[in-house]
């Protein structure tokens, strides 16, 4: 009996530690994803050990490849700083794509068409601005404007179909993905193909949102203009949902459309505006991808970033700050996998396994929140009973 009491006491201590770490609802959008990422790396470590490799060394090499830790040596004009700036350049479209998904989810809509909206925005920005020969002072802002308009229009069409004809946004956005993918592929192959790369012709440097091979302090860096914009807009979006009337209406419609309608909110208009706003961020993801990280478009291929954004948005709990952190983690894994594979001898696919585990665990975040809340209520009830006795 004493052994059982001791086990119960230890269990209660462990429970209280977990509740102390994860129970603060104000910070759960950060603490729970961090806890889930930790569990994912623990699970990945078991797999790496089973393969006969050292997980600590593999993760160390992963961070080296992503520019978080220094490598033993670097090529000319390169350093840990240049690797880190390349990481930020890589994660910029992912931040925008994840925010686009999060906006839709806040409004009760699942925008699975982010990839198509990215491609459409990237294509129009490429042919209108990328090939125009405009000066960079004019070209770079116009790239953003064209991306915002193209993505917003396609997102708005999906929202309108949902409101006017009750066409499920998942179905319509998937169909638009295919339409955009193959129609734009036809135009690229017909008018804009590069005969060598078999991709669209490269845009001018003046129109590109990444400053490529910029020489500073004896290094050649890739500096993403879009990254700064992404961070600023993530902060603005957080304030928008927390403080603005439209942000409240979007969340109200997403939580309970019938209740929102009863409260006097125009549900149809809010749905359309939600998808327009989601499309705007998808458009920004498209231009920072096709006219930033890359400088051309591969025909017949939808950017995987649009689909990865779904998982990152869920991992970040649809919170803009959480999304920035989640994008950073996933980008580190993607960018560092090649170096990890070459140095540690751990296959590159292990990085995909780690990412998959993170996303699998992140799908349990709502369940963990529920269990923590239930446990806190149970402990509060038991404490009350003890006081009564």
Image (cartoon, grey):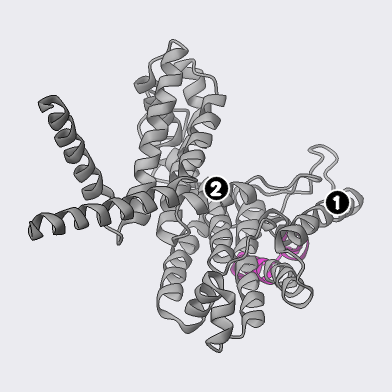
Tag on residue 182?
1
Question: Viewed as shown, does residue 236 lie left or right of 114?
Answer: left
Q: Is residue 377 above or below residue 219?
A: below
Q: Quadrant of residue 298?
A: top right
Assign the N terminus to one quadrant of the image: top left
Q: Quadrant of residue 349?
A: top right
Picture residue at 60% right of the left edge, 56% below the top: 288
Which residue reaches farthest top? 52
Residue 115 appears in view: yes
**Magenta stretch, overall SS:** helix
Q: Nearer the viewer, mark 2 or mark 1?
A: 2
Q: Is residue 159 above or below residue 343?
A: below
Say which residue label 2 marks. Answer: 311
- Estimate how packed mark 1 is, as few (under 14), some (14 to 19) or many (20 or more) residues with alpha carbons within 10 Å: some
Marks 2 and 1 sit apart, C-alpha to C-alpha, by 25 Å
Q: Is residue 145 magenta?
A: yes
Q: Which one is in front, 260 or 231?
A: 260
Q: Tell me where residue 382 appears, x and y as whole percent.
A: 18, 53
Q: Secondary structure at mark 2?
A: helix
Q: Secondary structure at mark 1?
A: helix
Residue 213 appears in view: no
Q: Tell me where residue 44 appears, x and y as whole percent.
A: 44, 26
């Amino acid at each position: 009996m004493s052994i059982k009491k001791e086990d119960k006491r230890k269990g209660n201590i462990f429970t209280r530690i977990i509740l102390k770490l994860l129970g603060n609802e104000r910070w759960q959008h950060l603490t729970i994803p961090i806890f889930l990422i930790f569990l994912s790396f623990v699970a990945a470590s078991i797999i790496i050990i089973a393969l006969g490799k050292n997980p600590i060394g593999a993760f160390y090499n992963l961070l080296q490849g992503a520019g978080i830790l220094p490598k033993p040596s670097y090529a000319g004009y390169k350093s840990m700083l240049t690797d880190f700036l390349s990481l930020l350049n890589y994660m910029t479209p992912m931040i925008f794509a994840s925010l686009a998904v999060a906006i839709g989810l806040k409004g009760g809509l699942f925008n699975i068409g982010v990839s198509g909206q990215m491609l459409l925005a990237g294509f129009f920005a490429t042919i209108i601005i990328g090939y125009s020969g405009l000066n960079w002072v004019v070209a770079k802002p116009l790239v953003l404007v064209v991306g915002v308009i193209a993505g917003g229009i396609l997102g708005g069409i999906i929202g309108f179909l949902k409101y006017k004809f009750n066409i499920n946004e998942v179905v319509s956005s998937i169909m638009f993905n295919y339409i955009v993918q193959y129609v734009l592929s036809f135009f690229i192959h017909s008018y804009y193909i590069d005969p060598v790369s078999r991709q669209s012709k490269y845009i001018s440097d003046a129109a590109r949102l990444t400053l490529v091979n910029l020489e500073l302090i004896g290094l050649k860096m890739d500096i993403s203009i879009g990254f700064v914009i992404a961070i600023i807009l993530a902060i603005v979006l957080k304030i928008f949902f927390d403080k603005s009337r439209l942000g409240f209406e979007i969340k109200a419609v997403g939580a309970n459309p019938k209740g929102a309608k009863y409260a006097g909110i125009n549900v149809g208009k809010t749905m359309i505006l939600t998808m327009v706003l989601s499309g705007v961020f998808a458009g920004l993801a498209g231009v920072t991808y096709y006219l930033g990280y890359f400088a051309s478009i591969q025909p017949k291929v939808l950017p995987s970033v649009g689909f990865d954004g779904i998982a990152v948005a869920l991992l970040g709990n649809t919170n803009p700050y959480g999304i920035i952190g989640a994008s950073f983690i996933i980008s580190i894994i993607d960018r560092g996998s090649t170096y990890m594979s070459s140095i540690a001898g751990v296959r590159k696919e292990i990085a995909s396994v780690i990412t998959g585990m993170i996303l699998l665990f992140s799908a349990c975040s709502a369940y963990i929140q529920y269990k923590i809340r239930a446990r806190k209520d149970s402990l509060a009830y038991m404490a009350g009973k003890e006081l009564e006795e």
